Amino acid sequence: MSLSSAINTAQTSLSNYATQTSILSRNISNASNTDYSRRNAALATSLSGAQVVSIQRAQDEVLFRNSLSSTATASGQETLLAGLTNLKDIYGGNDYESAPATLIANMRDTLSSYAAKPGENTLAQTTVADANTLAIGLRDASASVQSVRFETDQEISRQVHTLNELLASFETNNKAVFSGTQSGKDVSAELDERDSLIKKISEIIGVTTVSRSGNDMAIYTSDGITLFETVARPVTFGASSGFAASIVGNPIYVDGVALASGEGATTTARGSLQALVQIRDVYAPAVQEQLDEVARALIVTFAEKDQSAAPTLPDAPGLFTWSGGTVPSGATIVPGIAASITVNPALVQSLGGNPQLLRDGGINGAAYNANPDGNAGFSSLLDSYVLALDTPMAFDPAADLTSSASLLDFAADSVGWLELNRSEASSAYETREATRYRSSEALSNETGVSLDEEMSMLLELEQSYKASARLISVVDEMLRELMAAVR
């Protein structure tokens, strides 16, 4: 080998080492960046020796897609669990001290004591007070359910806005990747940014990606709706100004197609949006319907009946009434009845009422009075109310519970239904979160930076650098000796 060839080889090596060291340094500085993929310098041999011809970015399409899928699934399950926990908190947390079942049981116990001593005015007042607590509890629970729906609707609006921003950023980034690829530029940083955007999008809505020539990419939802193809497709949603039992939330449209909600406690939702729609349109309305059925059953159970020998008058509200002012007929949900249920003012002593009318009847006039003589020991009506609370009655199966049960059992089943769904959602979340972690870990192991490996390669480069530097030094010494001999 000539001295000129040796010096050229050494110089090329030093240039390669500088490039490789720069790449290794960048890898090491991004070791904790989960959106960074490891870079490697690709070498090729030419007449002048080995040269860096390209910078390769570590990637694994299969693991990346698995990571996107597990991220979307876990995000949807996490969102659903959070929504069910919010609904559970309406009932007072783990002990369900504010649940209708608890309040009804408290009122029944007081009513039983009153039935045993019907002449005690204090017990009459206590019973009415417990009934008032129950009515307030139903109204508050109904308002809280609609508040959960409203807050969920607002969160949907925020996430739709974020999703549109991410898609707009993706469009800009995808153009940079495509144009950079066409011009032969290193687009590793742009690809990292694009992968990061896709991960964020998958947390909001489940996606599948299709890679095309020139590093171009298209994005579709898990259901096949186009999110991005050449340009970002619009995701639209109209937030509601408020909610009531009879108000239905607006759908989310992706490229003009309505986005389906998730189904089941182990939800089919892919991403948080579908789970949010499921809370707003499925679970919260179901809880509201169950509250409405409890309220309807209370009004029916404590309704006053015509006491005449030949009854002609319709049943009328007794202990409980509502804004409709009637006794609902049939086992059919009355939307929003729980939001207006109240104790009949005729029984509230502080409002000038007489709590003993609960014992005697007659809230709606003499025809409904079962104790016209005012017998202090009269307990027939009170006993019938206590018995009715434990007697099976018809409920609307649309409330997702049994169609025949006692009022107490139905109210308890409502709590059990919510807890069962929340517990199932919690178990599913633990499983899906573990899957997301393992998928992310597998992707990181394949494409992420290992400090041990990078430092080991850095030491190897250092030794190679020393060898090239030594070669240059030897060539320099030989040239000096040669020049000295020529003189």
Image (cartoon, grey):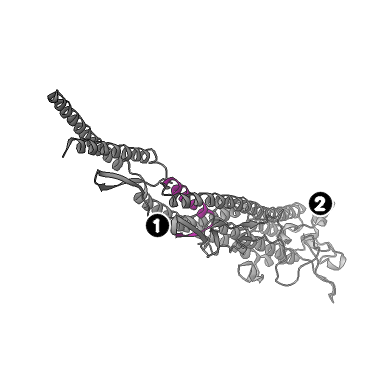
Q: Which is nearer the eye, 278 or 324? A: 278
Circle 2: residue type: Gln
Residue 475 in the figure: left or right of residue 204: left
Secondary element at tag 1: helix
Q: Position of residue 410 (x, y in %)?
A: 62, 65
Which mark, residue 349? 2
Q: From which residue to which does the magenta span run?
A: 188-212
Residue that label 1 marks: 61
Give the CA distance from mark 2 to mark 1: 74 Å
State the residue at coordinates (71%, 59%): 338
State the residue at coordinates (47%, 53%): 178
Residue 462 in the figure: left or right of residue 371: left
State the residue at coordinates (23%, 39%): 9
In the current view of this chain or complex, which residue is farthest to the right? 366
Circle 1: residue type: Glu
Q: In which quarter of the image is the C terminus?
A: top left
Q: Earlier in the sequence, mark 2 or mark 1?
A: 1
Q: How crowded is mark 2: few (under 14 residues within 10 Å), some or many (20 or more)?
A: some
Q: In which quarter of the image is the N terminus?
A: top left
- The majority secondary structure of the magenta stretch comes to helix
Quarter-of-image position of residue 418: bottom right
Quarter-of-image position of residue 299: bottom right
Residue 165 in the figure: left or right of residue 325: left
